[in-house]
Structures are given as structure tokens and as C-alpha cells.
Image: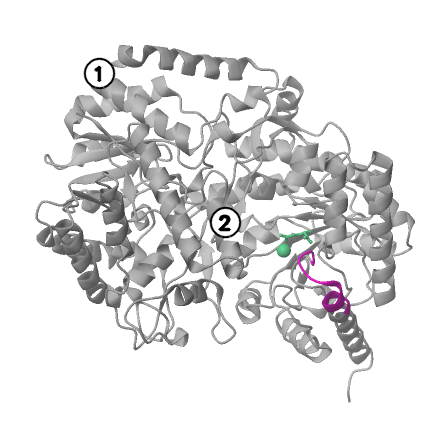
Amino acid sequence: MTISTNLGFPRIGTDRELKKVLEAYWAGRTDLASLVETGRRLRATHWALQRELGIDHIPSNDFSLYDHVLDTTCMLGAVPLRFGLKDATIDMDTYFAMARGTDNAHAMEMTKWFDTNYHYIVPEFEDGLEFRLASSKIIDEFLEAKGQGILTRSVMLGPVSYLLLGKSKSPGLEPLDLLDQALSVYIEVIGRLESAGARWIQVDEPVLVLDLDERVPAAFESVYKRFAQARKRLKLCLTTYFGSLGDNVDWAMRLPFDAIHLDVVRAPEQLEKALALLPPDAALSLGVVNGRNIWKTDLAATLDLVDKAATTIGTERLILAPSCSLLHSPVDVESEGTMDPVVQERLAFAKQKLQEVAVLTKAANEGRAAVGDVLQANRAVFDKGQASGRVCNAAVRKRLDSLSEEMFHRRKPFFGQRKSLQQAELALPLLPTTTIGSFPQTAEIRKTRADFRKGRLTDAEYTQAMRREIETVVRFQEDVGLDVLVHGEPERNDMVEYFGELLEGFAFTENGWVQSYGSRCVKPPIIYGDVYRPLPMTVEWITYTQSLTDKPVKGMLTGPITILQWSFVREDQPRRDTAYQIALSIRDEVRDLEAAGIRIVQIDEPAIREGLPLRQSERPEYLDWAVKAFRLATCGVDDRTQIHTHMCYSDFNEIIEAIAGLDADVISIEASRSDVELLNAFVDYKYPNDIGPGVYDIHSPGVPSTEEMVDLIRKMAEVLRVEQLWVNPDCGLKTRQWPEVEASLRNMVLAARRLREELASPRQ
Ligand code: GLN
Ligand code: ZN
């Protein structure tokens, strides 16, 4: 019999119960008992639901109060020494201290989980750290489910991935040096699970889809051999996702496992080789339902793939599953209210995805006829989608087919040539000062937007309120003495959602929340059809702003890659095509701003780095179209119009050449948190255009002094030419409070002035 399984269920709850209780607990509005009880209730509900849906192997320990990597850190007792843990087990205070920091100890770093928008807490390794079993969560949750009559498959992050996802803080200490220590804790856990009655464990080793260095295969071999010796009847499913085993396939398929899970949604090409190499006594778990997107599965096409596997290895050795944990998917389409039906009938969230797994499993076991009705209904949805004029727009297609080379280039190819033209218009001083776009989003602004949405304000009242806010922000910037002004973005709730709502081809859910980190959830827009811009989006706000001042006002847009990256995207065309469609819409907006007299336009691309594929070999292709999409969006303007871009969330060093390839006249970039690191990129690479490495970190509270900023700009001027430097904060100011913004910007303008004077009269 083919078995159906799940790799992990979303933790947040249909109604974001986890988020709510966590935030109440942190704010002291509820106690530990109610936090613990909510967690227990969510787990019980999710287990019961999965059983009801017909899933044979249901996961446990996929739940977490914050993050599963942090949970693994706790299991191993790998608490950084600064948290001063004395007791043997880790209490809730220590757990949240590691995640969120305290007055005495800064939080552990957080970073993106592979190429998803989920963030994990990065393990830290330092001399003096000793691993020991310090949390029995995985065993407790197995027993909890067992008490409910369900023998779950406990999920654990495997030791090699865990160590490679961490960072060493002590010179000379390599994460893999800790393998033996970690192994003994894992083996203790495996023994305990076995005694508790477990039959299967799921060991996630997602690093198997990455480019690995030569030490890693041997590490895997020794770990999995030891695991095989430690287990008696307990079976192990080695689990990979987010890509292909690729060049790791030969040795990975020889590891001692009872089953191996492969993501054949993301990487169907790996199936053939895996089938050929699968050891005769092992099972193959096929990840056939996309755990990372929100579309229904094409069931018939998927069954063709399942059949192919079954023909080679038989249905007995087949397991069917989502491609990865459903952590990355919203919970339940049925909790959507008033969505566009054309879109809604094509959606499948976590619950629906498990229904699909169950149907596919039934078809594998009993034949397609046993699920004939479901297959037919599924076919109809796909046919309808393709036929819908809402999905395919002939004009958009035609435009995309007729792109010409010059649309990707400014007329004068060198920034130096453009800069003099732009200076003639703008007459900016040396070290021009500006901000990244947003100003504090006060409670009042948010209320105005909410009132307008709910129909409590008329169009005219809303416009007036926003104009008042814009005027305040303009007068403020003039008073502070900034050189390039912005309108402050009061009308925007979110930099992607705002544009998605004004573009065609986008849909929005009411409840399609996905965990981003801890209690933080995001609700990405859904790109379901060809994208175009029916009407100008920002022109009225920006021209109004410009009418208030003689200083240049910078128009503010979100770039195509960021919009793509932070949305659920369609799968019936390459990502590149969707990016180009968005780029063309932005291009129209940029040109309209220019035509309306706006001389500077900034197109934010904070997400360009995070779209980078996991494998080195796939990166050049991505960077090629990502850069082209940006250029398509921006190159429609005259050379006298100045194009800015902004990026943050750091680590740009490795793509610095692609960033230069964007050919933005000016880039502002996050630098102050890791100033040394970022500036290093410019030691070897001579960045050609103008650049504003942020001179202060807007994420840390407090007001930077003029001296600090003067020092930092001096450091910047050592690796960059002073003529190419701009002076700005490192990101938007929307989460800050007015008093600190005012004080910080005044100090920043002073810093620029001081350096200008100094440079005008060099010391003898
Ligand atoms: N212009 C946006 C702002 O200032 C940029 C936000 C971002 O970089 N994430 O808020
Ligand atoms: Zn930013």
C-alpha cells in the first residue's frame, strides 16, 4: 500500500491563535499556563484534522512556540553562554530571551530559511559550549499525540543541517567539529522515542539540496551509520526539500535510511536517477503537492508521475507527501470570505493540500476510477483558468513579445555622462542628503487609512487628510535642511500590497497568513493573471508633494523583483515573465512621473538578494533576468531624470556586480549595522555610480550623534569617492517615532554640512 504523509503543519492556527497568545504573553497580558494550553490545543486540533483528512503518517514536533531551529538548539542544550543558563533544562524565559533578546543579552541572529520567507534563529557555536539533552519537547509531543490515539512521526532537524545552518563565534571552531557531541544527544533522543513506541522518525536534512563542500558527505555517512546502529525497529525517513539532490545524489542515496523524501515539485528532474539508485529495501517519499505555493495541484499530471515511480519500484514502497512542510502555506481556503471566485476556486492551502495528498494516495492504491469525480472537477478548474480572460491578457502578452533591446538601457550608457545632465537640473551639493521614503506611520495615519477602507471617510476627506500629512512631512524636511525630499508614504500600508492593489492580475486573501518569524505573519498577495497598470498609481500624490516645495521630490515605487518575491506567483509561466510584466507596469508609472515634472524616482528593490537560487549554478540566470527586469522598469526615462534604488537586509557583497548592473544613478543601501562588512565589498570592486551607504541604523532605537556619522562617512570616503557619496539613513523610517527621527535627521544633515565645509577648506 502507498502511504500518505505530511512533513509539517502550519503552527499559527486558522485564526492566528498562536500569534495572539504569544504577543499577549510577551506583553504580560496573559500567563504561561494559557500560552502552554493554546499550544496544546493547536497541536491536538492539527493532529485530529490530519487524521480526519486521511493522512497515514502525521508529524509531531513540527509545532513550535517560536522556531524549530531554536527548538533544536534547546534539544541540544546549545544555549549561548551570554544567556547565563544555570539549570539543566531550558525554561520559557530563556527560550524567548534567545529569540528576542533581553536588556542584558542581545537576541540570537535571525536569517532566512533557505529561499523561503520564513526566518530561523541561527545557532551559535562558541568554545565552552557543551551539548546535552536539555529539552524533551520532541518526546513530550510524541506522547501527547499518542495520548490522543495517534502514533506520529516525530520530525527533527538532522544534525548535519543543524550544524551547517549555524555560525561559529570562536576562531578555529568549525560547526562540523561538533558533530560527535551533537550525535550523542540525537542518539539519546532516538532511543527515547523508540522506547516511547515510535515507529518512524522524519529527519530533515535540507542542506542535501545545496552545493556542499567535501567534508560533508563523510559527515553524513558517519551520522546515518550511527543512527542505523542506534535504531532497532524505528524507521527513519531522510527528508530533503526546496531543490534537487543534484550532484549529491550518488552518495546520498547510499545512506542508510528506510525512506528518502524528495521534492519533485521543485525538482522533478531528480526522480529518474533517484528511482534508479533507490536501495531495494527502501521506500521513496515523493513530495508531489507544492507546500510553498497556494495553487491546486494538477492531479492527473501528478498521477502520471506517481505511476511512473510505481512502475519502477511498486506501490508498496511509495509514500506521497507535500513537497515540503506546509509551514510555508496558509492554513485553510475555507476561511476565506469574499474572494474573487475565479481565483478562489483555484486555491489550495494546507488543509486542501492534504486532501490532495489523500486523493492521490487513494488513486495510487485503488486506481484513478476510485477518485474519478475529484479528478474531473480538478481538470475543470484548470481548463477554466486557462480560458479565463482575467488570466490571459492579449495586450500584455503582445507587449511582452515585442520588447526591444533599447528598452533595457539608458540612452547614455555611462552614469558619468548622465550625472552632469542631472546635476544641471538638480544642482545638489556635495554629499547630498535624503531619506529612504517613509516617515513615521503614526496611529493617526493608520486610523485614517482604516477609516477610509471601511467607508467611514469619503474620497475627498481621505485625500485631504493625507495631503495634510504630506505637507507636514515636506515642511519638516525643509526645516531640517534635507536636499532631496520625499512624500513620506502615509497612504501605504505595505510596499508590495499597495501596488498589488492598484495593478491588475493581483488578488488578496483575508486570511492567507503565513508565518515569517516568531509571532510575525505575512499575507502575500496572489499574482494569478497577466499584470498591467490600468491607471497611474502614485502620480497625484507625488506631484502634489512637488507643488509644495522648490526642492526636488523623489517619487517612490516598489521594484518588480520585490513585488514578485513577496507575492505568491503563478506557475503557468516562468517567474521571469511575471517579473517583466510587473516591470512594464512600473515603467509606465516612472514615465508618467517624469512627464508630470518629477526629476527623481526611486524604485526600491530590497528583495533582490533573497531571490538568489540556492545552487550556485542557477544564480547567473536569475541575476540576469532580475537585473533586466529592474532596467526594464527604469530605463524608459530621459537621461536627465535621476533613478534611485534602495536595498536592505544586507549581504550584498556577493552580488555587487549585479547591483552595479542595475545601473541606477543612485543606490541607498543598508550599511551601518555591518558597516565594515559592506564597505569591504568596495575595496576590491569599484562601484561606478552614486551610492548612499546608510549612515545610521534605523532599526536600533536611540539617536546617532553627528560625530558618529561624520566618522562613518569618512570611513566610506576611504573606499568610495566622496563625489559619489550620498548621506541617508539605512532604511525607511515608518516604524520609528517622530522625536528620534527629528533628532537623528538633524544630526545627519549637520554631519553632511560639517564634512562639506571641511572639504571646501582642506586643512594645511
Ligand atoms: N521606501 C520604503 C520605505 O522607506 C523602503 C522600505 C524597505 O526598504 N523595505 O519604507
Ligand atoms: Zn530598506
Ligand 1 within 8 Å, label 1 CB = no
Type of the residue with mark 2: Lys
Q: Position of residue 577 (x, y in %)?
A: 56, 31
- Name the spot of residue 419 as percent of width and height, x first: 77, 55
Q: Which residues are magenta?
A: 733-742
Amino acid type of disc 1? Glu
Numbered disc in front, either 1 or 2 = 2
Q: Is residue 617 left or right of residue 438?
A: left
Q: Are marks 1 and 2 in contact (CB under 8 Å)?
A: no
Residue wearing tag 1: 366
In this view, the residue in front, 163 or 666, is 163
Frontmost residue, 665 versus 48: 48
Task: Tell me if residue 214 can be seen.
Answer: no
Q: Residue at coordinates 79% horizontally, 77% vertically from top-left?
A: 754
Can residue 736 be found in the magenta stretch? yes
The N terminus sits in image quarter: top left
Q: What number is the disc on residue 19?
A: 2
